[in-house]
Image (tube, rainbow, N blue to C red):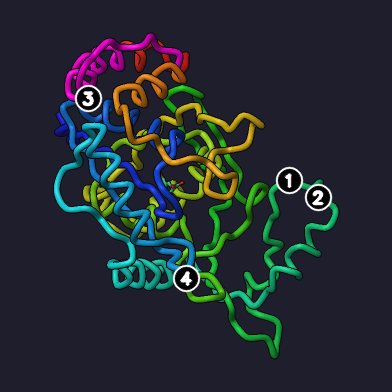
Amino acid sequence: MPKQAPYIGRFAPSPTGPLHLGSLAAAVGSFLDAKTHGGHWLLRIEDIDEGRCDTASVKHIEHTLIRHGLQWQGEVWVQSERHSFYEAALKRLSMLNLTYPCACTRKEIDEANALREPGENRIYPGTCRHGMPTGREARAIRFRCPTEPVQWQDHRMGHFSNDLNASSGDFVLRRGDGFWAYHLVVVVDDLASQVSHIVRGEDLTDTTARQIALWKALQGGIDTRGIVPPPAYWHLPVILAEDGQKLSKQTGAQAVPEHDPVLNLNTVWQHFGLDKIKATTTKQWLELAAPVWANYRAAQAAR
Ligand code: GLU
């Protein structure tokens, strides 16, 4: 029988502001899921967009996690220290002929999507897929999406079949300003740290198909015995602001309050629809929460 891969989970915040309750919920969920599987839980700081990230937020995130008893294993993974790995991944994809340079501006892509409703996904029209128009200069590097739909399973929401050509089109791996795109760095790091389970907020559900396509592409040409299947996914309900918007720095989300970490843990717990846990320390709270989480997982399984 093939050996079961160990459970490796992760929490991967972008340090664009202090940790808010929405991110704490993703941290608690992914932490407890790893613990109830006897697995590892990693912390990855997604600070690749250096203009939007700051070290004060990194410190705040680490401090807040520790204050809530959410201790990660090993060194913190820091994306801004991993450029050479992203470069190597891009090179690999380009050798497999899965990338191409693209000259299109945001305005041109918007114009190609002029008939779409506001709020609908913008789709890259494929202008540069078979070569840039003459006289144009490359801005971004794009990934050639697979023609067949990406099939995947979410623990709570069930089966998805996503046709990337109809939802995003060929997407960006390296942006025109030189920054790495989110999908590439997430997948390179999840692969490098051998993440087996991704538990995160449901606002990221629609990024999953692109990430699975990349995960598979990055293993193209590898001997089938070495191929690692994509992680298992569980997208948790996200905590919204009172006006229904996603909590974020942009929507003015407050930092997780400092004074009573057990109260904060109970706030996210009740958001999952679970009963408050009586505990005096975060350690005790997490111990009592683990078996409840295991039952919650079973009850959440898509049927
Ligand atoms: N860095 C992303 C965020 O803070 C999360 C990425 C992920 O969990 O895959 O929204």
Name the residue type under label 1.
Glu
Disc 1 versus disc 4: distance between alpha carbons? 25 Å
Which range is magenta?
273-294
Q: Nearer the viewer, mark 1 or mark 4?
A: 4
Pointer 2 with pointer 1, Cβ within 8 A: yes
Q: Is residue 237 left or right of residue 93?
A: right
Residue at the spot x=63%, y=73% of the render?
130
Going from N to C along the chain, the mark reached first, 3 or 4, is: 4
Q: Nearer the viewer, mark 2 or mark 3?
A: 3
Q: Earlier in the sequence, mark 4 or mark 2?
A: 2
- Disc 3 vs disc 4: which is toward the camera? 3
Q: Is residue 275 above or below residue 244?
A: above
Label 1, on which residue? 120
**Mark 2 lies on residue:** 116
Answer few, some or many: residues within 10 Å of disc 1's Cα (few below 14, many 20 plus, some between 14 and 19): few
Which numbered dot is residue 282?
Answer: 3
Nearest to the observer: residue 142 or residue 18: 18
Q: Earlier in the sequence, mark 1 or mark 3?
A: 1
Residue found at the very far bottom of the displayed protein: 135
C-alpha span from label 2 to label 1: 6 Å
